[in-house]
Image (spheres, rainbow, N blue to C red):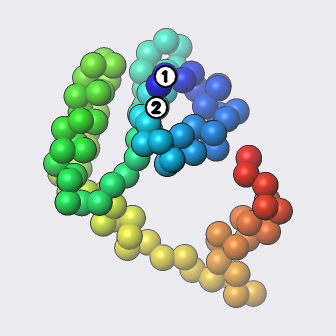
Amino acid sequence: MEVKTAQLKNKLSYYLRRVRERGETVIVYDRDEPVAMLGPLTGSADWKQQRSAILAAARKAGMEVVLPVRSPVGILAEVTASPASDGRTDIATIDLVRGGRDY
């Protein structure tokens, strides 16, 4: 799927939902040139295959992409939420501000 930056900015939640639920890859264009790609993250067991597929899709779109050899999922798993002084985590604060809405 291809999307321009303005459209991505206005409907980011929609495109993230498609990536998450359908496993689609979104190629982002700025002034008719591909600049970024959004895709699903998977477990490290098949990272080599995923990496190859992402690099192939990027080449096909005319993009130059650099990906880590090690799966980024392991890197993300090391990040933990730090509670605020009142005990809320970042996610709880975002949920509170959103009021249950998914923008």
The reply to whether discs 2 and 1 touch (Cβ–Cβ < 8 Å) is yes
Of residue 1 and residue 82, the one placed in the foreground of this image is 1
For marks 2 and 1, the one nearer the N-term is 1
Q: Where residue 41 sits in the image (x, y, percent)?
A: 37, 52
| Mark 1, residue position | 2
| Mark 2, residue position | 26
Q: Residue at x 29, y 60 (%)?
A: 43
Q: Where residue 93 sits in the image (x, y, percent)?
A: 73, 71
Lateral position of residue 15 relative to residue 22, left or right = right
Whether residue 17 is situated above or below residue 80 in the rendered picture: above
Residue 97 found in image quarter: bottom right
Q: Residue at x 70, y 87 (%)?
A: 87
Q: Disc 2 versus disc 1: distance between alpha carbons?
A: 6 Å
Residue 61 found in image quarter: top left
Q: Where residue 78 sits in the image (x, y, percent)?
A: 37, 73
Lateral position of residue 102 relative to residue 35, left or right = right
Name which residue type carries label 2.
Val
Of residue 28 and residue 47, the one placed in the foreground of this image is 47
Q: Where residue 19 sits in the image (x, y, percent)?
A: 48, 42
Q: SS class of the residue under badge 2?
A: strand
Q: SS class of the residue under badge 1?
A: strand
Residue 12 found in image quarter: top right
